[in-house]
Image (cartoon, grey):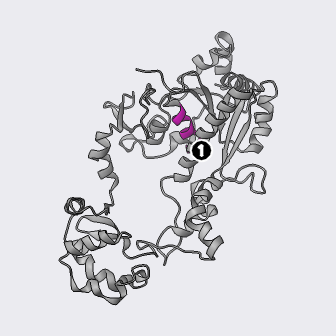
């Protein structure tokens, strides 16, 4: 196999949670040596469901098994002087730290970028928090739902007659991880050019607010319009909606007139297509309830598979709404060789995990090792900064590692 893209890069991942873990995973899967520093009780990710066979355990969390592939795990109690000293040595040796610790805690522990870079001018650190650093919300504790609400994106999600919803599946945390990995690579590139390390601090709220910049903020700034939740119907041209079918749901979107015309032909050119309310389809959404009654029954008589074949033959870009089970069995993802299988001591069968989110022809993505057991590499990692033998034994007796 060709050399991995990030061979030679070492990263210390710290602080726990999804965002830091996903950032570390993105780099580790491309060949970086990512050392996951965990408290003796383990990262919080290890305690998040779902669990293999619905049996909780710190080695059985699906999130941990996915997020921590290709990493080494070392346990370290940062509440101790010795633990913090070892952390500083590991951080400086690594050259890059990705952390989700609040800045106040970093400063209290003496592990901020200013502390760690004092004797290491090429040292880089990425700090991930929901609200960032240097504002009145610097110390606020928050997770994905708060980021969704604070960014304004929740204002657009859900049924217009009910309360707003957060982005599902911890999407803000995963977005934070993506941007943290990018920031770490950019900082490393800059350091190679000028020899100067830097601190990149990320605000997950800022990241999700950027998503809103085009969809919500710009229309408000330029036109004063503030669209709320649309539910299953978009308040734009008609139809643009999620529609019930015989065995689930289908997205119907007909901005292109020729697709709308083909859709009408499939239904036998019904007389109702000449209804005056449909003549301006940019305003027709105001009459969705009455207009839906014309064609929804036709959709409900057909399955997703039938409609997929029919629309494909007629070059109509409607899309079935897949269930998670359908995604897991997707022929498209199988053709992409998306899924990866990994052996793990907690499972008699190989564990199937999501694979590469991209393809690199010359430096391929790969899972080279399973997610580590808690503290599995502590001895190995500490030996790399000169801690071993009797010193390591003392640390173990005192519960520091």
Against 22, is 292 above or below? below
Front residue of this view, candidates 239 and 158: 239
Q: Quadrant of the C terminus?
A: top right
Magenta span: chief secondary structure: helix
Q: Is residue 213 magenta?
A: no
Q: For the point 55% across and 49% down, which residue is it? A: 175
Front residue of this view, candidates 211 and 34: 211
Q: Quadrant of residue 80?
A: top right
Residue 187 placement (x, y as % from top left): 67, 35
Q: For the point 49% across and 38% down, which residue is it? A: 67
Q: Quadrant of the N terminus?
A: top left
The answer to whether residue 119 is left or right of residue 171 is right
Number of numbered discs visible in the structure rendering: 1
Residue wearing tag 1: 179
Residue 263 placement (x, y as % from top left): 25, 71
Residue 32 placement (x, y as % from top left): 55, 27
Give the SS element for disc 1.
Answer: helix
Q: Residue farthest to the right?
A: 118
The answer to whether residue 134 is left or right of residue 294 is right
Against 21, is 215 above or below? below
- Stretch of the chain drawn in magenta: 17-27
């Amino acid at each position: 196999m060709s050399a991995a893209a990030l061979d030679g890069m070492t990263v210390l991942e710290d602080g726990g949670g999804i965002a830091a873990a996903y950032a570390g995973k993105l780099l580790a899967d491309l060949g970086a040596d990512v050392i996951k520093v965990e408290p003796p009780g383990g990262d919080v990710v290890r305690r998040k469901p779902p669990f293999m066979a619905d049996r909780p355990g710190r080695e059985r969390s699906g999130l941990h098994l996915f997020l921590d592939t290709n990493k080494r795990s070392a346990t370290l109690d940062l509440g101790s002087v010795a633990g913090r000293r070892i952390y500083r040595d590991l951080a400086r040796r690594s050259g890059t730290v990705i952390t989700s610790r609040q800045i106040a805690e970093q400063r209290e522990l003496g592990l901020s970028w200013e502390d760690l870079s004092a004797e290491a001018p090429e040292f880089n650190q990425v700090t991930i928090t929901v609200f960032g650093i240097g504002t009145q919300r610097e110390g606020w504790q928050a997770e994905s739902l708060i980021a969704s609400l604070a960014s304004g994106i929740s204002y657009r999600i859900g049924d217009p007659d009910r309360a707003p919803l957060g982005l599902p599946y911890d999407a803000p945390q995963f977005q934070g991880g993506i941007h943290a990995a990018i920031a770490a690579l950019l900082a490393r590139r800059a350091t190679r050019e000028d020899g100067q390390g830097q601190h990149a601090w990320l605000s997950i709220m800022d990241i999700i607010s950027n998503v809103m910049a085009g969809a919500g903020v710009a229309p408000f700034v330029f036109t004063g319009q503030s669209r709320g939740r649309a539910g299953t119907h978009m308040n734009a041209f008609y139809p643009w909606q999620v529609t019930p079918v015989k065995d689930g749901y289908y997205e119907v979107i007909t901005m292109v007139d020729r697709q709308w015309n083909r859709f009408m032909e499939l239904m036998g050119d019904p007389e109702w297509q000449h209804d005056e309310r449909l003549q301006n389809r940019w305003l027709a959404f105001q009459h969705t309830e009455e207009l839906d009654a014309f064609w929804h029954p036709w959709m409900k008589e057909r399955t997703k598979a039938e409609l997929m074949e029919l629309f494909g033959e007629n070059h109509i870009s409607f899309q079935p709404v897949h269930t998670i089970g359908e995604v897991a069995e997707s022929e498209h993802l199988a053709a992409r060789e998306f899924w990866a299988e990994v052996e793990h001591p907690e499972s008699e069968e190989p564990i199937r995990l999501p694979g590469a989110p991209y393809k690199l022809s010359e430096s391929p993505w790969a899972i080279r090792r399973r997610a580590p057991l808690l503290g599995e590499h502590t001895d190995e990692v500490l030996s790399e900064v000169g801690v071993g033998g009797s010193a390591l034994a003392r640390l173990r007796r005192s519960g520091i590692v």
